[in-house]
Image (spheres, helix red, strand yellow):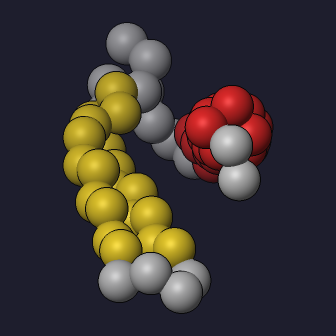
């Protein structure tokens, strides 16, 4: 795989992750009482076939 194909496939995957994750979070926040609350969030990314795990943590604040 060329570097260009590698970069494009990674960008496509990450865009899909970002868009679908944002949609899912927004729906969950709309369906719960989130006003004034802060939620701990965590994403665990693994790649089958590689010994790879990447964890991202953060906070998501509900509306004020």
Where, quadrant-wise, is the C terminus in this rendering? top left
Q: Position of residue 16 (x, y in %)?
A: 74, 41
Residue located 39% across and 65% down the image: 44
Question: For this view, does 61 lie left or right of residue 47?
Answer: left
Residue 31 visible in the displayed image: no
Q: Position of residue 57 (x, y in %)?
A: 25, 49
Question: For this view, does 42 lie left or right of residue 58?
Answer: right
Residue located 51% across and 74% down the image: 47
Q: Along the line of sight, which residue is nearer the eye, 41 or 12?
A: 12
Q: Along the line of sight, which residue is nearer the eye, 32 or 25?
A: 25
Q: Quadrant of residue 55?
A: bottom left
Q: Along the line of sight, which residue is nearer the eye, 49 or 45?
A: 49
Q: Is residue 25 above or below residue 62?
A: below
Q: Is residue 55 above or below residue 48?
A: above
| Residue placed furthest toward the top | 64
Residue located 51% across and 41% down the image: 33
Q: Along the line of sight, which residue is nearer the eye, 16 or 37?
A: 16
Q: Is residue 36 above or below residue 8?
A: above
Question: For this view, does 24 lie left or right of residue 53?
Answer: right
Q: Position of residue 18 (x, y in %)?
A: 62, 36
Q: Quadrant of residue 27?
A: top right
Q: Position of residue 42 (x, y in %)?
A: 33, 56
Q: Quadrant of residue 50?
A: bottom left
Q: Is residue 63 above or below residue 50?
A: above
Total number of numbered discs in the rendering? 0
Residue 52 visible in the displayed image: yes
Residue located 61% across and 37% down the image: 3
């Amino acid at each position: 795989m060329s570097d260009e194909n590698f970069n494009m496939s990674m960008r496509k995957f990450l865009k899909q992750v970002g868009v679908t994750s944002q949609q899912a979070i927004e729906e969950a926040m709309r369906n719960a009482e989130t006003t004034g609350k802060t939620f701990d969030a965590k994403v665990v990314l693994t790649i089958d076939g590689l010994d790879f795990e990447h964890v991202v943590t953060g906070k998501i604040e509900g509306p004020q």
